[in-house]
Amino acid sequence: MTEAPAPGGGRTPPPGSPLCSRPARIGAAELGGERVVIAVATTADTIDGTRGAGGARGSGSALAQALAAAAGGADLVEFRLDLLSPPRAASPQAQAAFWHEAILLVAAALAPTGTPLLATARSRREGGGAAMDPREQAEALEALIDLQAEHRAGRAIADALDIELSTGALPALAERAHQEGIAVVASNHDFTATPPDGEMLDRLERMEAGGADCAKIAVMPRSEEDVDRALQVAARARASLSIPVAVISMGERGRRSRLEGWRYGSALTFATLSADPAAASAPGQPTIAALLPLSHRDRSKTRAKPGGFPQADGC
């Protein structure tokens, strides 16, 4: 029996990746299960199309985008809180209150669709819009969890929360989120380079050790070899970690990692609703139309080779 080739080695690996030993559930979505989970992120700076309450819901609002993503087949909606126009001179607590109210509105609208909600407040240091240092970001996320907890019994809240590894507070925040039934996607982003393989694996391992339900890293390739390395790291992490992982190579060069990453163990990928680059929350995201056929491929003739690499029967 021959080993599956490295990415870019001349032969396309057969469909499938090893199932995760500890799959994570985010609402109805299962990460690390039979198929890749496709998320679509909001990119709007307004919640419902207006600055005030009770206004018309514009097509460019976060609410409209979330509902369109659910209708378009997304398994998961990522609500980019950091892209919303924030209250002026907001303290971490005031920022958390603003995010909390936004989540309540969008979560309530999504509830009838059954599409789960991942709340993300990406920092500027990792390519987002939240102008917070790690301490402020951790304080805001802690306050957000507390506010969500107060409404958990009576209203729809976020199913999962993105926590950046760089906050330095992943263990405490993950523990607090889990107490309230909120799943945690730990994340790390490098928009300048693809770190060495060992460093990428170390970050994923630190996320698992910190209590994450899913570990995600996104890196920028400078060559095709960088994309290949990212895919290999996904396979190695799938073999060594018990939680689901997502390893994404960004930009146009890394687009194939979003289309093929599931073959190497990536449990989560991100798509856009349209081909307009402005619709993407990160560079290189394909449309959901391009990803949906891949997410339902037949795995009946596929099994995992020890070591985390996909292998077809009869090879």
Image (tube, grey):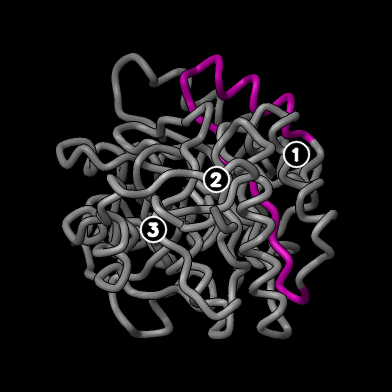
Is 48 positioned to the left or the right of 126 in the image? left
Q: Which residue is denoted by mark 1 in the rendering? A: 205
Q: Amino acid at mark 1?
A: Glu
Q: Nearer the viewer, residue 260 or 105?
A: 260
Q: Amino acid at mark 3?
A: Pro
Looking at the picture, how far across and down is residue 213, in whole percent?
56, 32
In space, the residues marked 3 and 2 are separated at their CA atoms by 12 Å
Packing grade of label 3 (10 A; few <14, some 14-19, many >=20) is: many
In space, the residues marked 2 and 1 are separated at their CA atoms by 21 Å
Q: Amino acid at mark 2?
A: Lys
Report the disc number at residue 93.
none
Quadrant for residue 300, please give it: top left
Return the disc, 3 or 2, that comes first in the chain's sequence: 3
Q: Nearer the viewer, residue 79 or 33?
A: 33
Report the disc number at residue 305.
2
Report the disc number at residue 15.
3
Task: Determine the residue positioned at 61% across, 50% down.
Answer: 216
Looking at the picture, how far across and down is residue 35, in whole percent?
35, 47
Looking at the picture, how far across and down is residue 168, in whole percent?
81, 39
Looking at the picture, how far across and down is residue 150, in whole percent?
45, 18
Packing grade of label 2 (10 A; few <14, some 14-19, many >=20) is: some
Task: Determine the residue positioned at 57% across, 77% down.
Answer: 254
Q: Nearer the viewer, mark 3 or mark 2?
A: 2
Task: Determine the residue positioned at 34% across, 59% down.
Answer: 62
Question: What residue span does the magenta drawing correspond to?
Answer: 169-193
